[in-house]
Image: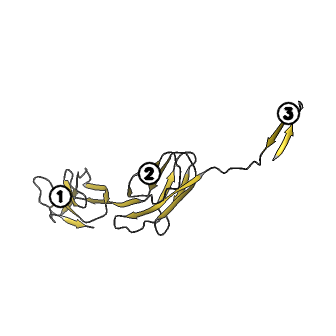
Amino acid sequence: TATSTDANGNTSEFSLCQTVAANVFSVSGRIADSANAPMSGIVLRIPGTPSRRTVTDANGKYSLGDLPGGGTYTVIASARNVTFAPATRIFNSLAGDQINQDFVGTRESTIRGKVQGSVNGIAFPLSGVTMTLAGTADRTTVTNSNGDYKFAFIPTGNYSITPTRGGFAFSPVSATTT
C-alpha cells in the first residue's frame, strides 16, 4: 500500500496495482470427409477484425487462437471443389474456448464431354442433346453448339450419363464414370 498527499494535505491510500490480461480464447476442431477421413490443407479463416487464418494439419485438425473475449466470430472453411457442412460456424459473445467445432467436407467434381454425330464417316458436333446424369447426384444439361456439355460441382461418386435427342440413336446408349 502506498499513500499520496495533495497540496491541501489530503491523503489517499493506493493498493498494489496489477496488469490484468484480456480474456482470449480459441476455436478448434477437425475437418473430415463423410467417411471420417481427415482432410488436410483446408483453409479456415475468420474475416474482420481481428482476422485469423490457419490450415488443417495431416489429421484434419485446426485451431484459431488469440480471439478477444466478447467478440462475434464467423469461422469459414474453404477449399477448391469442396463444400462444407456446416457452411460456417458463428460464435456470438465468445466467452470461452470452443472445441470440437468440426466440419464435414464433400469433394466435388466436374464431368464434361462432347457429343458428335456422324454422317458418311464425317463427324460433326451435335447440339441440343439432353444429357442425363444419374448416380450420387442427378442432373440434366443440354449440349451447346459445339456439342459440349458439363456437369459442375457434383459430389465425387459413381455416375451414368445418358444422351437423348429425338430422331437420333446413340452408341453407346449410356456411359459410366467414377
Residue 12 position within the rendered picture, expressed as x and y whole percent measured from the top left? 82, 38
Question: Which residue is label 3 attached to?
Answer: 10
- For marks 2 and 1, the one nearer the N-term is 2
Distance in Å between CA atoms under marks 3 and 1? 96 Å
Mark yes or no: residue 19 visible: yes
Residue drawn at x 73%, y 50% is 18
Distance in Å between CA atoms under marks 2 and 1? 41 Å
Question: Which dot, 2 or 1, sits closer to the camera?
Answer: 2
Residue drawn at x 38%, y 53% is 86
- For marks 3 and 1, the one nearer the N-term is 3
Residue 69 position within the rendered picture, expressed as x and y whole percent measured from the top left? 57, 48
Question: Which residue is label 1 attached to?
Answer: 163
Residue drawn at x 25%, y 61% is 136
Q: Left of 140 or right of it: where is 59?
A: right
Question: Contact, CB < 8 Å: mark 2 with mark 1?
Answer: no
Residue 38 position within the rendered picture, expressed as x and y whole percent measured from the top left? 42, 67
- For marks 2 and 3, the one nearer the N-term is 3
Q: Left of 133 or right of it: where is 42?
A: right
Mark yes or no: residue 55 visible: no
Looking at the picture, the colour scheme in use is: secondary structure
Question: Which residue is label 2 attached to?
Answer: 89
Distance in Å between CA atoms under marks 2 and 3? 56 Å
Kindly state the secondary structure of the residue where label 2 is placed.
strand
Q: In the image, what residue type sits under mark 3?
A: Asn
Q: In the image, what residue type sits under mark 1?
A: Pro
Residue 165 position within the rendered picture, expressed as x and y whole percent measured from the top left? 14, 53
Q: Left of 46 or right of it: where is 84?
A: left
